[in-house]
Image (tube, rainbow, N blue to C red):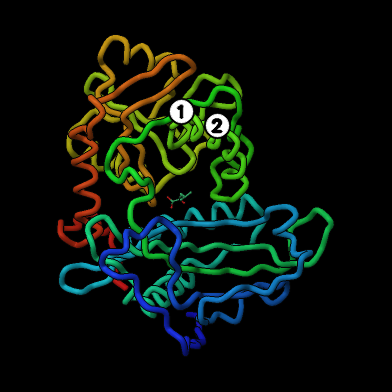
């Protein structure tokens, strides 16, 4: 059990107004959680302090070799005033999996959960309640050792910041356009593709800029070896409904094991929809498009929730899906997942955790 020291802000910021569209990740709450790690001392000095800039040595290892882990989850306010987290155990488990891969010391699960609850509780008033909004929680660890040699850092900082958010994509629940990347790759098996770390996201920027210039919101990655098998979108996992069956790429070591991905697979199976985690080639997708069996495409992610895909571009081929609207499975998933998160639908899976 952590003994968290709390220093409250003396200058609270005004809460965003009801009409604020809450562009994703632009507003931050009044406080943040911090905890230090030092070799020989372990994790220590857990504290909640006013949100403020950090002081770090320019030689801190994170700036040079990118040793960092991050996570993303959300808090919601129910109609009867409770604050809920959605499957925080999955994020904590994945955070420590990332930590192990990146030689960052693990954070005890119960301490992690306690820290999440404590910081969310303090800034509970910041949880927005308008349809489609939530409080995004960003826990992360950075290597702070002032050293320029390449080895795991001996010092780290664990930080949790909070941001009231609306939809991740400006399109909201309207379908996004996705560019299928066949020039650059995001990750390969054995690399860090399944870890949640900044390196995977910086690797995606060049393609994302190219895709944006062509009017596409995001990039869909193919595998790095054959440049043929579908992997993920970077900010979300991807699902296809082909001839009545829901398919998503199976986890192969270079795909992020998304929490919403797992939730989606479980719900679809419970609803009796044939659901497969399998190898999906881009040729299969194009063929299903040509013979009119590509019924729905959608992405899943904490930030994106369920994001219908209305158009895929692969080289010169443009595949328009679901008449440019949201498909019935995407809508049902969105309604069910957000319904559980907001406490409007009974949580038979014990997915929500009260703060
Ligand atoms: C999330 O969905 O929480 C993510 O971390 C994706 C992010 C790049 C916004």
Callout 1: CB less than 8 Å from ligand 1: no
Q: x%, y% of residue 67?
A: 67, 55
Can you say whether 195 is above or below 340 in the image?
A: above
Q: Looking at the rendering, in which quadrant would you find the C terminus?
A: bottom left
Q: Which of these two is toward me, 150 or 218? A: 218
Q: Which residue is mark 1?
A: 179
Q: Residues within 10 Å of mark 2 (few under 14, many from 20)?
A: some
State left or right for residue 298 relative to residue 25: left
**198 w.r.t. 354: above or below:** above
Mark 1 surroundings: few (<14), some (14-19) or many (≥20) residues within 10 A: many
**SS for callout 1:** strand
The label number, if any, that marks residue 319 in the structure image = none
Residue at 79% over, 67% down: 146
* Secondary structure of the residue carrying numbered label 2: helix
Where residue 132 appears, as percent x and y from the top left, is 26, 55
* Residue 120 position in % (x across, y down): 38, 73
Residue 242 location, x and y as percent?
A: 28, 21
Q: Are marks 2 and 1 in contact (CB under 8 Å)?
A: yes
Tell me if residue 59 comes above or below residue 275 in the rendering: below
Residue at the spot of label 2? 210
* Point 75% across, 67% down: residue: 145
Q: Nearer the viewer, residue 163 or 152?
A: 163
């Amino acid at each position: 059990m952590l003994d968290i020291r709390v220093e409250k802000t003396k200058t609270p910021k005004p809460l965003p107004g009801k009409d604020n569209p809450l562009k994703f990740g632009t507003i931050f709450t009044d406080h943040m959680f911090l905890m230090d790690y030092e070799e020989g001392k372990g994790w220590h000095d857990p504290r909640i302090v006013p949100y403020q800039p950090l002081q770090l040595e320019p030689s801190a290892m994170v700036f040079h070799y990118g040793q960092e882990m991050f996570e993303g989850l959300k808090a919601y306010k129910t109609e009867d005033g409770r604050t809920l987290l959605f499957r925080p155990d999955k994020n904590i488990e994945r955070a420590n999996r990332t930590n192990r891969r990146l030689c960052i010391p693990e954070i005890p699960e119960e301490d992690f959960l306690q820290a999440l609850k404590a910081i969310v509780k303090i800034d509970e008033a910041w949880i927005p309640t308008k349809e489609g909004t939530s409080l995004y929680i960003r826990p992360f660890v950075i290597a702070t050792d002032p050293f320029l040699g390449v080895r795991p850092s001996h010092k780290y900082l664990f930080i949790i910041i909070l941001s009231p958010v609306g939809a991740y994509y400006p399109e909201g629940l309207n379908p996004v356009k996705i560019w299928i990347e066949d020039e650059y790759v995001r990750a390969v098996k054995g690399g860090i593709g399944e870890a949640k770390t900044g390196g995977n996201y910086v690797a995606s920027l060049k393609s994302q800029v190219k895709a944006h210039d062509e009017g596409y919101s995001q990039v869909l990655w193919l595998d790095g070896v054959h440049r043929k098998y579908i992997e993920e979108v970077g900010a979300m996992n991807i699902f296809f409904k082909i001839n009545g069956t829901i398919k998503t790429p199976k986890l192969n070591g270079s795909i992020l094991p998304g929490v919403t991905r797992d939730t989606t697979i479980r719900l679809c199976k419970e609803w009796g929809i044939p659901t497969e985690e399998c190898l999906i080639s881009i040729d299969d997708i194009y063929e299903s498009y040509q013979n009119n069996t590509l019924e729905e495409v959608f992405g899943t992610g904490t930030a994106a929730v369920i994001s219908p895909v209305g158009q895929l571009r692969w080289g010169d081929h443009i595949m328009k899906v679901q008449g440019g609207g949201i498909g019935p499975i995407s809508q049902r998933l969105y309604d069910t997942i957000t319904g559980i998160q907001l406490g409007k639908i009974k949580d038979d899976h014990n997915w929500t955790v009260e703060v």
